[in-house]
Every structure is written in C-alpha cells, then in structure tokens.
Image: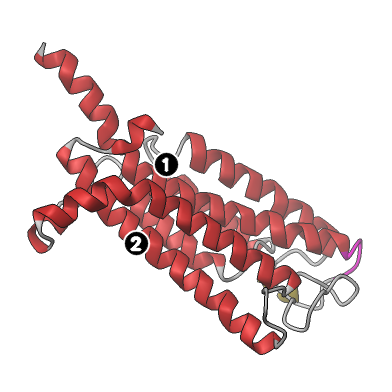
C-alpha cells in the first residue's frame, strides 16, 4: 500500500513546476514563430546587419511595431524559416519533454539557437526564467514554506493553475499589441507601448507567483495539476 500511494504523489510532485516551465518555454517558442513569420514575409533579401527589424516597413501596422531581433543569417527568408522551425521545436519540447533528464539544458540550447537566427531579443528573459524553473522540476523549491504562512501556501498551491493561465493570456495580449498596436480605448501609440511592456511585466509576475504556489503544492504532494 505504501508503494502504491507513493507513485501518484511522485507524479503530482513534478506537475506544478513543470507547468510553469512549460508555459515559459511555449512563450519562447511563440516568439520564434512570431518573429520568423514576419522575417520570412520580407522575402529573399539581405539583412542589413546583425540587428534587424523582424517586421519590415511593408508589413508594419503601427509606429512601434518593428520587433527587433538578432540574427547571424544574412537573409530574411532563411532566418525567418529557421526561427519558425526552432520555435516549433521549442514549443514541442516545452510541452512534452521538458521534465526529461537534461530537459532544461535542451530548452536553453533551443532558445539560444533561436536567438541567433532571429527569434527575438526580449524572449531571452522568458528563456532564462524558464530554464531556471525547469531545473527545479524534480526538486521543487522548499524555501517558500519558511517565509509564507501555511495558509498562504495552501491558497497559492490551489491558485497556481489560474495564475499560469493568466500569465499566458497576458502574454497573448502583449503580443497582439506589439504586432498590431491595438489597445481598446487607447489611441496614443506611446501609451499602447507602455501597456504592452506592462502586460509582459505582469505576465512574469503572475508566473513568478504561480511558481511559488506550484512549489508549495509539489512539496506538500497536494498539487491540483492532476485534475487539469
């Protein structure tokens, strides 16, 4: 009986932290798809240097919608195809394999490769955060329990799935603003840019708090991830 009850607990133990790492990895991969798509639209033309604007003048939808990227590939079409391909691999790895041995290292490798082929610059923040979280999938953080009251840990242990979902929604909203520049009720592009960056910061904050809750749930063996 002791062996049978230990197996489900072990499975639950990794789910919360894995979900946060997977969400961050997916965001990294989406950045590659986003930048790569617009880079490919610029066609079989030479890049002006190592720093490029993923969204060219012909595709730009608002004044701040340039999406700068770094690339070592001197061709927009090729760098776009490579960025999208690596982005898809990053998403697949983050969803299905990030909890494997060396899963965090592969995520870091894919993200680094995507950075070199035009997958975006800002995604490095999500990449490093996701890599750090992925390293803790089988070793959930325990320090929160000595800082937060037990009641707060229990609440966060139940709330982390919603916080992960909120983080992904905020990321999708920020991505929409970055590309299109549309914020309901806002006509000033500078204000829209501030809202875009604020949404990204709020997304990181939501996933940071989700990590606290996921770690608390994983340590306690009471993560709600099994019901997702």
Which residue is rendered at x = 51% and y = 77% of the image? Answer: 198
| Residue 31 visible in the picture | yes
Query: Dot 1, crowdedness within 10 Å: few (<14), some or many (≥20)?
Result: some
Image coords of residue 119 (percent x, y): 65, 61
Which residue is depicted at the point 60% across and 68% down? 174
Q: Quadrant of the N terminus?
A: top left
Tell me where residue 27 sits by quadrant. bottom right
Q: Is residue 43 magenta?
A: yes
* Visual colour scheme: secondary structure
Q: Are marks 1 and 2 in contact (CB under 8 Å)?
A: no
Residue at the top extreme of this rendering: 1
For marks 1 and 2, the one nearer the N-term is 1
Q: Which residue is mark 1?
A: 103
Numbered label attached to residue 204: none
**Quadrant housing the C terminus:** top left
Per the picture, the main secondary structure of the magenta-coloured stretch is loop
Foreground of the two, 127 or 180: 180
The image position of residue 52, as x and y in percent, is 74, 75
Using the numbered discs, state the Cα–Cα distance from disc 1 to disc 2 in whole angstroms: 20 Å
- Residue 90 versus residue 189: which sits nearer the camera? 189
Q: Residue furthest front?
A: 185
Residue 101 image-quadrant placement: top left
Camera-near label (1 vs 2) is 2
Q: Is residue 85 left or right of residue 99?
A: right
**Where does the magenta region start and end?**
42-46
Which type of secondary structure does the marked residue at label 2 adopt? helix
> Residue 95: percent from the left, percent from the top?
50, 39
**Left or right: residue 18 compared with residue 181:** left
Residue 129 position by quadrant: bottom left
Question: Is there any visible trace of residue 108 in the rendered image?
Answer: no
| Residue where numbered disc 2 is placed | 208
Q: Residue 12 vs residue 220: left or right?
A: right
């Amino acid at each position: 009986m002791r062996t049978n009850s230990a197996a489900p607990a072990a499975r639950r133990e990794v789910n919360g932290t894995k979900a946060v790492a997977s969400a961050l990895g997916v965001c990294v991969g989406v950045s590659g798809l986003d930048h790569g798509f617009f880079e490919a639209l610029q066609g079989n033309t030479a890049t002006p240097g190592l720093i490029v604007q993923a969204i060219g003048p012909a595709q730009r939808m608002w004044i701040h919608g340039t999406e700068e990227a770094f690339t070592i590939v001197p061709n927009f079409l090729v760098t776009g195809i490579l960025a999208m391909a690596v982005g898809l691999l990053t998403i697949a790895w983050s969803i299905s394999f990030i909890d494997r041995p060396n899963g965090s290292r592969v995520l870091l490798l894919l993200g680094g490769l995507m950075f070199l082929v035009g997958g975006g610059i800002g995604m490095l923040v999500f990449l490093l955060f996701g890599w750090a979280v992925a390293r803790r999938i089988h070793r959930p953080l325990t320090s929160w329990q000595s800082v937060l009251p037990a009641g707060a840990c229990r609440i966060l242990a139940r709330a982390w799935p919603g916080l992960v979902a909120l983080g992904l929604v905020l990321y999708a909203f920020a991505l929409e603003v970055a590309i299109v520049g549309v914020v309901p009720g806002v006509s000033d592009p500078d204000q829209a840019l501030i809202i875009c960056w604020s949404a990204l910061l709020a997304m990181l904050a939501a996933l940071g708090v989700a990590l606290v809750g996921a770690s608390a749930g994983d340590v306690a063996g009471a993560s709600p991830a099994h019901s997702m």
